[in-house]
């Protein structure tokens, strides 16, 4: 039986549209399906190598939504992202393939994900496989097929011009990938033990847009089975860390997480009574989530810095150029701030 409550929560967690869930019937059951071991591995490698937060996009880290299907997971990318200069766009699809597709000349210079392969391109998008996880299947969606082919051709030309072999079309692991596995495979496998956590986070990517109040989100892998998310909040906008913590740990829709560490700085180092920001005003709230019986930690830093009156208007322009939703933009960068500063 279909449920409007399920549909609403699916939109909130995955970032996908209510129209899609009403059409597909996925709102018939509550919760978000966990990935199998192979599928979790390719999702883990994609998220860690994609390195979201490289520029300002319509959605945090330039991922619009994640769609979990029977035979694969679709990652819906934003079209373009911008720096604080709206005349300097980034092509998100181009950034994605340059971050994740493998190439290299030695185990110390291997770029991208070892063993990742381009399967095919169709109207759905760019289909990716992982040699060491035969049942894994990830699809990047966004540009039309002709654009994907052009991006791959450009990347191939740039790579071969640098004298670096292209590896994403090899039917087996190349020698440089086998060497990489021999030198770094143990560390790589240890990091991938947290794939249950990073995969679950990718499948709930919408929370950074629907719940968070940060105007800028960045993340990276620290190297000790810890993924760090750094969220920047405008002065005067309350970080939604309690709401995010509740969403992450929801018994039906979240993941089986407990709070390993938490610190809230929201009520400290306030501005003076005249509500004028002190020059060194700044605060950081920090939450760490984990499972006591499984490896992996997600650390989220909720940063609020002294107001940068010369910086935030540029960010507002860049997000507007990236076609960020006006309601979301007003929530994370209220326009009253710019009117007040002239």
Image (cartoon, rainbow, N blue to C red):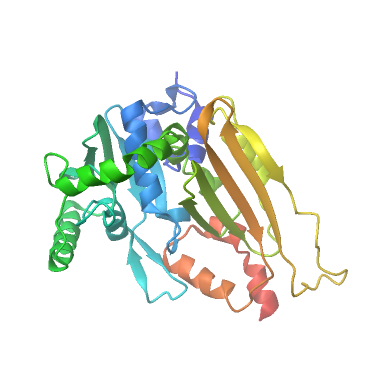
Q: Is residue 68 visible?
A: no
- Residue ranking furthest to the front: 183
Whole-percent x and y of residue 231? 58, 55
Q: Quadrant of residue 74?
A: top left
Whole-percent x and y of residue 252? 55, 25
Question: What's the residue at 62%, 68% (across, down)?
Answer: 335
Quick one: 118 or 56, which is closer to the camera?
A: 118
Q: Is residue 320 visible?
A: yes
User: In the picture shown, does residue 195 fall above or below 176?
Assistant: above
- Residue ranking furthest to the top: 1
The C terminus lies in which quarter of the figure?
bottom right
231 left or right, relative to 306:
left
- Figure disc tally: 0
Quick one: 133 or 174, which is closer to the camera?
A: 174
User: In the picture shown, does residue 275 fall above or below 107?
Assistant: below
284 left or right, relative to 83:
right
Whole-percent x and y of residue 288? 62, 41
Q: Quadrant of residue 184?
A: top left
Quick one: 265 or 61, which is closer to the camera?
A: 265
Whole-percent x and y of residue 112? 28, 52
- Residue ranking furthest to the bottom: 342
Question: What's the residue at 26%, 41% (across, down)?
Answer: 182
The N terminus lies in which quarter of the figure?
top left
288 left or right, relative to 187:
right
Question: What's the residue at 65%, 35% (across, down)?
Answer: 259
Question: What's the residue at 42%, 41% (across, down)?
Answer: 17
Q: Quadrant of residue 5?
A: top right
């Amino acid at each position: 039986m279909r449920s409007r409550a399920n549909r609403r929560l699916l939109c909130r967690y995955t970032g996908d549209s209510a129209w899609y869930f009403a059409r597909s019937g996925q709102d018939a059951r509550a919760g978000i399906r966990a990935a199998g071991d192979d599928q979790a591995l390719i999702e883990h490698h994609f998220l860690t190598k994609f390195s979201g937060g490289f520029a300002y996009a319509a959605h945090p880290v330039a991922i619009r939504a994640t769609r979990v299907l029977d035979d694969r997971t679709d990652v819906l990318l934003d079209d373009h992202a911008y720096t604080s200069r709206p005349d300097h766009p980034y092509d998100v699809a181009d950034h994605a393939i340059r971050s994740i597709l493998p190439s290299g000349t030695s185990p110390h210079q291997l770029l991208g994900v070892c063993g990742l392969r381009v399967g095919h391109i169709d109207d759905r998008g760019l289909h990716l496989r992982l040699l060491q996880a035969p049942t894994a299947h990830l699809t990047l969606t966004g540009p039309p097929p002709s654009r994907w082919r052009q991006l791959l051709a450009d990347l191939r030309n740039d790579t071969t011009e640098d004298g670096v072999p292209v590896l994403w079309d090899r039917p087996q692991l190349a020698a440089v990938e086998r060497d990489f596995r021999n030198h770094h495979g143990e560390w790589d496998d240890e990091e991938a033990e947290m794939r249950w956590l990073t995969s679950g986070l990718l499948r709930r990517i919408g929370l950074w847009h629907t719940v968070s109040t940060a105007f800028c989100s960045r993340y990276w892998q620290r190297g000790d089975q810890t993924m760090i998310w750094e969220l920047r909040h405008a002065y005067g906008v309350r970080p939604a860390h309690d709401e995010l913590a509740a969403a992450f740990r929801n018994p039906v829709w979240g993941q089986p997480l407990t709070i390993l560490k938490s610190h809230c700085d929201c009520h400290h180092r306030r501005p003076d009574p005249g509500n004028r920001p002190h020059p060194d005003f700044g605060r950081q709230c920090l939450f760490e989530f984990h499972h006591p019986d499984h490896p992996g930690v997600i650390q989220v830093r909720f940063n609020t810095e002294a107001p940068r009156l010369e910086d935030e208007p540029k960010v507002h322009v860049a997000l507007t150029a990236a076609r960020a939703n006006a309601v979301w933009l007003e929530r994370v960068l209220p326009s009253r701030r710019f009117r007040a500063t002239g």
